[in-house]
Image (tube, helix red, strand yellow):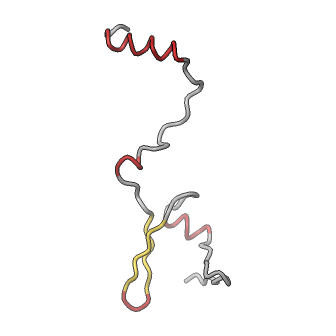
Amino acid sequence: MTALTVTAKGQITLRRGLLQHLGIAPGQQLEVDKLAGGVLALHVKTPRGLESFVGCLPPPARSLTLDELNTLSRQSWAQEP
C-alpha cells in the first residue's frame, strides 16, 4: 500500500507508479467515486460526444490559403481528382 501526504491546501500527489497503473497521462482528468467505509475509487474521465474529437488529430504541416480551400471545395463538389 502506498502512503500519500495531504498538503495544507488539502491536496495529494499520486506517485508516477500509481498514475501508470491507472493509465493516466498528463492533462487527463479523474473521476472519484465515494464508496462505503471511506474508500475512494479513481477512474480516468472519458470524454463524451464532440469533446472526444477535439484535438484528436495532429496539427497540419501547414495552413491552407483561402484560394487553396476554395479550389479543394470546387474539386470536391465536382468530384474531380
Q: Nearer the viewer, residue 29 or 66?
A: 66
**Image point (44%, 89%), residue name:** 38
* Residue 15 location (% of width, % of height): 62, 72
| Nearest the eye: 35 or 76 | 76
Residue at x 52% of width, y 17% of height: 66
Residue 10 screen position, x and y as percent:
61, 82
Q: Residue furthest bottom?
A: 37
* Residue 74 placement: quadrant: top left
Q: Is residue 60 above or below residue 55?
A: above
- Horizontal side of 20 relative to 48 (left or right) equals right
Residue 32, percent from left and from top: 44, 74
**Quadrant position of the C terminus in the picture:** top left
Q: Quadrant of the N terminus?
A: bottom right
Q: In the rendered image of this protein, does residue 33 appear above or below residue 75?
A: below
Q: Position of residue 75 (x, y in %)?
A: 38, 10
**Residue found at the far right of this picture:** 8
Residue at (42, 77) in percent of width and height: 41
